[in-house]
Image: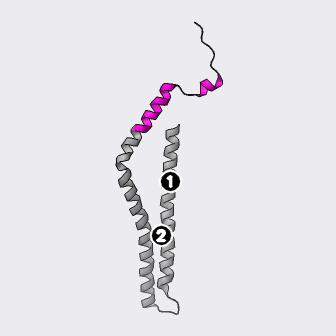
Amino acid sequence: MTEEPQSGLAKLRPSLSQEVGAKAARKLKARRKSAQGVWFGLGMMGLIGWSVVVPTLLGAALGIWLDRHHPGKHAWTLALLVAGLSIGCLNAWHWVAKEEMEIRDEQEDNDE
């Protein structure tokens, strides 16, 4: 019996057993991660919340201290509260972007 030459598409396409194996591996990995999914999500919300709250409160506290010890015609409290909130939002954005990149990288690794 002679083998027929494979076309270019057949060479590039993985065999059925490889596809089934890859899908099974993805399912097993998803099952392992599903247990941590809820806790991971809650932890991420907490991390984002604290990354906004802490700089905001630090800015407000510093502003109150400056207003008491160095009074002037402008209030430091409001200015530093807004600055702390801005820093906190940038910090939260950084964390979300980092997690999004990790998720994308993981998905790309699974697709290969």
- 10 Å crowding of disc 2: few (<14), some (14-19), many (20+): many
Q: How far across and how far down the image is residue 9, in percent?
A: 63, 26
Secondary structure under badge 2?
helix
Query: Tag 1 or tag 2, which sits nearer the N-term?
Result: 2
Image quadrant in which you'd find residue 13: top right
Secondary structure under badge 1?
helix
Inspect the image, locate mark 1, and give the three-letter code of the amino acid beneath it: Glu
Above or below, comparing residue 5 to residue 103 in the picture: above
Above or below, comparing residue 89 to residue 106 in the picture: below
Q: How far across and how far down the image is residue 51, in percent?
A: 43, 66
Residue that badge 2 annotates: 88
Inspect the image, locate mark 2, and give the three-letter code of the amino acid beneath it: Gly
Residue span colored magenta: 1-27
- Front residue of 24/61: it is 24
Q: Is residue 7 left or right of residue 92?
A: right
Write the residue at 39% across / 63% down.
Answer: 46
Q: In which quarter of the image is the N terminus?
A: top right
Write the residue at 37% across / 58% down.
Answer: 42
Above or below, comparing residue 77 to residue 50 in the picture: below
Q: How far across and how far down the image is residue 55, in percent?
A: 44, 72
- The verdict on residue 26 being magenta is yes
Looking at the image, the residue that sits furthest to the right is: 8
